[in-house]
Amino acid sequence: DAGVIQSPRHEVTEMGQEVTLRCKPISGHDYLFWYRQTMMRGLELLIYFNNNVPIDDSGMPEDRFSAKMPNASFSTLKIQPSEPRDSAVYFCASSLGDRGLRRNTEAFFGQGTRLTVV
Amino acid sequence: KQEVTQIPAALSVPEGENLVLNCSFTDSAIYNLQWFRQDPGKGLTSLLLIQSSQREQTSGRLNASLDKSSGRSTLYIAASQPGDSATYLCAVHSGGGADGLTFGKGTHLIIQP
């Protein structure tokens, strides 16, 4: 497997524009996570899905952020409208749930999308 | 709310030394703990995963220990090499229905040739 694939790797956009980040999890994984990394706050969980269903979006900073997972092999994180303070590296990760205990195991991360909003 | 702290924040040592990176967490009710490596401008590479029932895991020159009751983990790197230079992140998977990872801020490690 090619691992978790994110696109684009870099995105530069103007304030107010819509930004869409994409993620393809590892095939067979049933958990998908979106994280954001900044110098000040480190890595923070934004939202995660289990079997394509959003489970916890309490980390999403504002209503400007939204995430979808229309199928098991694709997820998007959208920011509309974008603001300079959204500049960060956004990571997608996936893992395989422990069927018996209904919790996930080792997490694998994509290469990230570096977002710059000017 | 789970909090993860890593000490030291930065470390610079000469090649060949054995070193220890520390991680502490506030809520001992965890499912597992994972150590990652992050190179500049890159993603996170999983190094070791320790389940809550385990005391340690080893992979090559890396050894991670877990003391869940005291809320601590250490990552031991033997015979360090310049290629080990990176940021090392500790993350815990907590219970109570929270399925994401809580990360520390990392230890930035430089191995001098």
Image: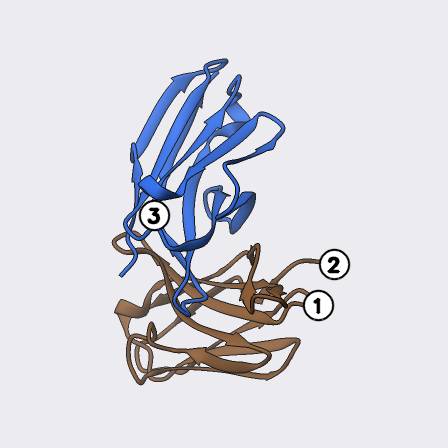
Chain colours: A brown, B blue
Return the mark for residue B104.
Answer: 3
| In the depicted structure, whether residue A45 falls above or below residue B9 | below
- Name which quarter of the figure residue B57 lies in: top right
Q: Is disc 3 surrounded by few (<14), some (14 to 19) or many (20+) residues within 10 Å?
A: many
**Picture coordinates of residue A31 (x, y %)?**
56, 70
- Distance from disc 2 to disc 1, alpha carbons, whole Å, reads 7 Å
Say yes or no: labels 2 and 3 on the same chain: no
Return the mark for residue A1.
Answer: 2
Image quarter in which the C terminus of chain A is found: bottom left
Q: Is disc 2 surrounded by few (<14), some (14 to 19) or many (20+) residues within 10 Å?
A: few
Residue at 34% x, 48% y: name it: B104
- The chain identifier of the residue carrying mark 1 reads A
- Name which quarter of the figure residue B9 lies in: top left
Q: Amino acid at mark 2?
A: Asp
Q: Amino acid at mark 1?
A: Ser
Image quarter in which the N terminus of chain A is found: bottom right
**Eye-nearest disc, 2 or 3:** 3
**Picture coordinates of residue A81 (x, y %)?**
33, 83
**Picture coordinates of residue B71 (x, y %)?**
33, 43
User: In the figure, is residue A51 to the left or right of B106?
Assistant: right
Front-most of A60 and A89?
A60
Q: Which residue is mark 1?
A: A27
Residue at 26% x, 61% y: name it: B1
Tell whether label 1 touches label 3 (CB within 8 Å).
no
Q: Is disc 1 surrounded by few (<14), some (14 to 19) or many (20+) residues within 10 Å?
A: some
Front-most of A108 and A101?
A101
Q: Amino acid at mark 3?
A: Gly
Residue at 37% x, 55% y: name it: B29
Residue A118 visible within the image: no
| In the depicted structure, whether residue A21 falls above or below residue B68 | below
- Distance from disc 3 to disc 1, alpha carbons, whole Å, reads 28 Å
User: In the figure, is residue B26 to the left or right of A36?
Assistant: left
